[in-house]
Amino acid sequence: MGQREDTDTAETMELSFEDAFTLGGNKDEIWSSISDPGVLAQCIPGAEDVERISRRKYTVDIQRGISHLTIELSGDVELVEMNEPEWIVADGRAYDPRTHSDIEGVAAMEMTELDDGEVRVDYKATLTFTGGVTSIPTRMIERVVTSDVDAYFENVRSTVEDD
């Protein structure tokens, strides 16, 4: 995985991720896949439901186990800036009523077509956690989030390249 930073206090924890990878296909095919709620539900680890509310807004329900906790997140993601199919900036918020935890995230992704028929995908994301989930050690949350980010993009790769 790429470069990461983490900072935390007793009440807030922040994780930042940055990486790049390549996918077979073209930007239009990839964009179509990653904006389809059915594909997103299959690609996001722990996703129980992803619904498109509008062209720029989605609702999500995700269940994940971290340490001894099961977190049930309900929230929304808005595509706050985009230039389809070049790049996107998304802003999301979710809440877990069991741990009284809020998770906010900002993510940016840019796609560049390469000469060899592949697409380079660069992404950056920052997640901020507050509430009960911050009682879990940062390294444990980072390990789960890192694994989920890797699994998401591997699932996207499988979906795009198998079509």
Image (cartoon, rainbow, N blue to C red):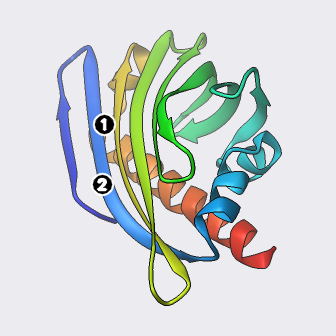
Residue 140 or 89: which is nearer the viewer? 89
Q: Residues within 10 Å of mark 1 (few under 14, many from 20)?
A: few
Residue 119 or 69: which is nearer the viewer? 119
Of badges 2 and 1, nearer the viewer stands 2
Vertical comparison of 88 with 57: above or below: below
Vertical comparison of 162 with 8: above or below: below
Is 9 placed left or right of 144 in the picture? Answer: left
Q: Are marks 2 and 1 in contact (CB under 8 Å)?
A: no
In the rendered view of the protein, which quadrant contains the N terminus?
A: bottom left
Q: Position of residue 103 (x, y in %)?
A: 45, 22
The residue tagged with tag 1: helix, strand or loop? loop
Residue 66 or 72: which is nearer the viewer? 72
Three-letter amino acid code at disc 1? Pro
Three-letter amino acid code at disc 2? Glu
Please report whichever mark, 2 or 1, sits nearer to the chain's N-terminal start. Answer: 2
CA gap, disc 2 and disc 1: 21 Å
Q: Which residue does the numbered mark 2 point to in the structure image?
A: 18
Q: Position of residue 9 (x, y in %)?
A: 17, 21
Q: Which residue does the numbered mark 1 point to in the structure image?
A: 137
Q: Position of residue 121 (x, y in %)?
A: 44, 64
Residue 102 or 106: which is nearer the viewer? 106
In the rendered view of the protein, which quadrant contains the C terminus?
A: bottom right
Is 19 placed left or right of 56 in the picture? Answer: left
Going 37% across and 23% down the picture, which residue do you hit?
Answer: 129
Going 78% across and 28% down the picture, which residue do you hit?
Answer: 51
The residue tagged with tag 2: helix, strand or loop? strand
Q: Residue placed farthest to the bottom in the image?
A: 116
